[in-house]
Amino acid sequence: MKRIIPVFLLLVFWSGLQPARAELTIEITSGTEGALPIAVVPFAWNGPGTPPEDVAEIVAADLARSGQFAPLPRADMLSRPARPEDIRYRDWRAVGVDNLVIGRIVPREGGGYTVEFRLFDVFRGRQLTGYSFPTSGERLRETAHRVADIVYETLTGERGAFRTWIAYVTVTGSGDERRYSLQVADSDGYNPRTVLRSRQPLMSPSWSPDARRLAYVSFEQETAEVYVQELATGQRRKVASYQGINGAPSWSPDGRQLALTLSQDGNAEIYILSLDSGRLRRLTRHPAIDTEPAWAPDGRSLVFTSDRGGSPQLYRLAVDGGRPERLTFEGGYNASADFAPDGERLALLHRDGRGNYRVAVQDLERGMLTLVSEGRLDESPSFAPNGRMILYATEAGGRGVLAAASVDGRVGQRLRLQEGEVREPAWSPFLE
């Protein structure tokens, strides 16, 4: 079995955040035919009582959410091996399983645990990979997500994005009791933490490239202002409070600049703000409304929404200036772009022929547009850091929920709170 050294996965960040009361509940609404059959056997427990977390269940749930795997129900397992020598490959071939995950959780002297796992190819009868992780009770879920990431990458060749975070805004109450909360949770909706609570709207959370900070728009002073907040300490600073609109922050890939929408000169335009010097540079100059900038992964251009052509469409502009290039032509409304990590696709909001606002993916080289959501009022699409899924806000049962879809639209899931609404999602970068 291969071993890796302990990895301190940004645990300190959670110390600056307050636990939230409500977790998001995930409902898988559609899946992919031909998903890879896999069995994740309950991990053996070498301690008293029951383990603090069901690591195998978390791993299986992660793999199922991806739409790439179909985990075998535990009731259909003919055996539950914990060691390689206990595996009877014929049992797993009989139930149609291609790959098998086994493992164990061992309490460590002095506190904490060691989580071990192995991944096997059932038909070849050999181990594909295996790791051992020292961890703590508080980090068992994180460790389970890490196991799922390794299994996913080993079998698909693509990096997994289970050990990542999502940011979103919750809204509860009504009238004078209406409350807004900016929260951060694991990618599966567990372990929510509150970044900020407010009686006034909070909008447009945006992750820094190192996942250490969030930029967002707050109306706490009854006017739009942009803040940058450190997750580890909770410290924040106001970076944009100009006359008029201050909105839609987007981080540059190097984390040193923000693209913003400002109207300090009388019209909504795109600006670039240096976070080190505070220097502000205007990028667009047009009587139309220019808004919602999204920085390209290579840092050399931005995509933004503008109605300069008569309807909201997406345009690309070099950060050094020049003439904007129109990117979208299908339909009368295309907005709210987010770049895929490879820079080759955009997630966007598209109004279809029936007037529904749906999430779509556009291939930038071919110009092909693919609808991936099925809602009527979808909004705020955000790519997963591996580019396989898109998180967005929608409505279900008369209130705001989050949803996710694969980039081909074949896999869908919904994340909702038991009470209140959730909106404005943003998927974090990888947690290095």
Image (cartoon, helix red, strand yellow):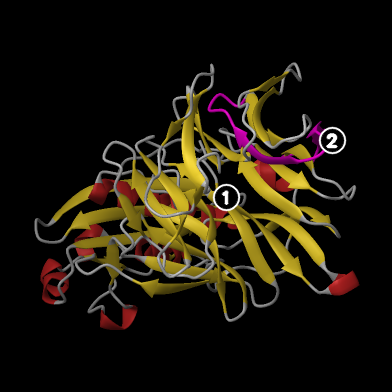
Q: Nearer the viewer, mark 2 or mark 1?
A: 2
* Up-down relation of residue 370 to residue 129 (above or below): below
Residue 231 visible in this rendered orientation of the protein: no
Residue 96 falls left or right of residue 177: left
* Up-down relation of residue 177 to residue 277 (above or below): below
Front residue of 46/67: it is 67
Front residue of 110/236: it is 236
**Residue 234, magenta (yes or no):** yes
Query: What residue range appears in magenta?
Result: 232-255
Residue 253 falls left or right of residue 66: right
Which quarter shows the N terminus? top left
Give x and y (percent) for residue 249.
66, 38
Give x and y (percent) for residue 122.
15, 61
Look at 59% across and 55% down and name the residue there.
425
Q: Which residue is mark 2?
A: 243
Front residue of 253/235: it is 253
Q: Which residue is mark 1?
A: 426
Where on the picture, by quarter, is residue 275?
top right
Where on the picture, by quarter, is residue 48?
bottom right
Residue 94 falls left or right of residue 1: left
Look at 24% across and 62% down and name the residue there.
100
Front residue of 339/25: it is 339
Where on the picture, by quarter, is residue 341?
top left
Give x and y (percent) for residue 273.
69, 24
Mark 2–mark 1 Cα distance, whole angstroms, equals 27 Å
